[in-house]
Amino acid sequence: MTVPPPPAGRVLVDRTLPDTEATEALGRQLGGLLRAGDLLVLTGPLGAGKTTFTRGLGAALHVRGQVASPTFVLARTHPSEQGPPLVHVDAYRLGGADELDDLDLDYAGSVVVVEWGAGLLDGVAESWLDVVIERPTGAGDASAVDRDRDPDDVPDEPRRVTVTAHGPRWAGVEVTTG
Ligand SMILES: Nc1ncnc2c1ncn2[C@@H]1O[C@H](COP(=O)(O)OP(=O)(O)O)[C@@H](O)[C@H]1O
Ligand SMILES: [Mg+2]
């Protein structure tokens, strides 16, 4: 017997974001909806804007500390001044779901955001948001850009962002075009 595919989910957002600020603003908008127990999985190539988006989430959640690429740490917890902490995970260097599990993250008590987490979180949560950020075709991958250049000095160009909701947590939740 074959296992049925997971439910396809419901598209909450499908937008073209012209610049860095727009991507961060979408993070702030979605961040306003979040509460402890929420999980977001971010997918997109290097330089797509996953961390930029997470910075917006952090602003909406009033977290302390700069949200940055957690290059040398796998997970960074940002306490909030008034709500749940934001746990920012970069799964790029993780060997797999087992290593993610070893981090022993407090999913129930935090908002957890996992960059490069696609496929690693099966069974972890009943509900989650899949955030997919695509660079325009032909723009190339930021990793292919001159290594001597400041990685944070990428010119603004549009991104296509889709947010797909899975599970009962998101039933009836709508995101208005802002
Ligand atoms: N529309 C856009 N949305 C997000 N970032 C953009 C956009 N246009 C250019 N950028 C730049 O691309 C880079 C994205 O970096 P980052 O958010 O760290 O990506 P990732 O975490 O996906 O590797 C930043 O330097 C940002 O200023
Ligand atoms: Mg990143």
Image: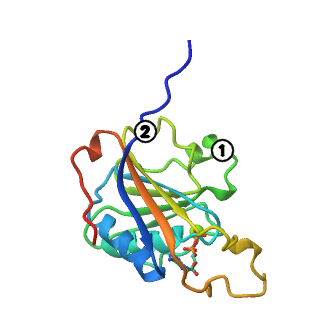
- Which residue carries the number 2 mark? 8
Image quarter (top left, top right, bottom left or bottom right) of the N terminus: top right
Instruction: Give me the C-alpha separation between circle 2 and circle 1.
Output: 23 Å
| Relative depth, front residue between 61 and 152 | 152
Q: Residue 149, image x and y in percent?
A: 73, 87
* Residue 101 to residue 130: above or below: above
- Residue 74, by quadrant, is bottom right
Is residue 117 left or right of 34 when viewed as pictured? right
Q: Residue furthest left?
A: 172
Q: What residue is pinned by disc 1?
A: 96
Please tell me in which quadrant of the rendered image residue 54 appears: bottom left
The secondary structure type at the circle numbered 2 is: loop
- Measuring from the top left, give residue 84's x and y in whole percent: 31, 61
Q: Residues within 10 Å of mark 1 (few under 14, many from 20)?
A: some
Q: What colouring style does the render use?
A: rainbow
Residue 73 at x, y percent in the picture: 62, 65
Q: Give the camera-side residue of 48 and 11.
A: 11
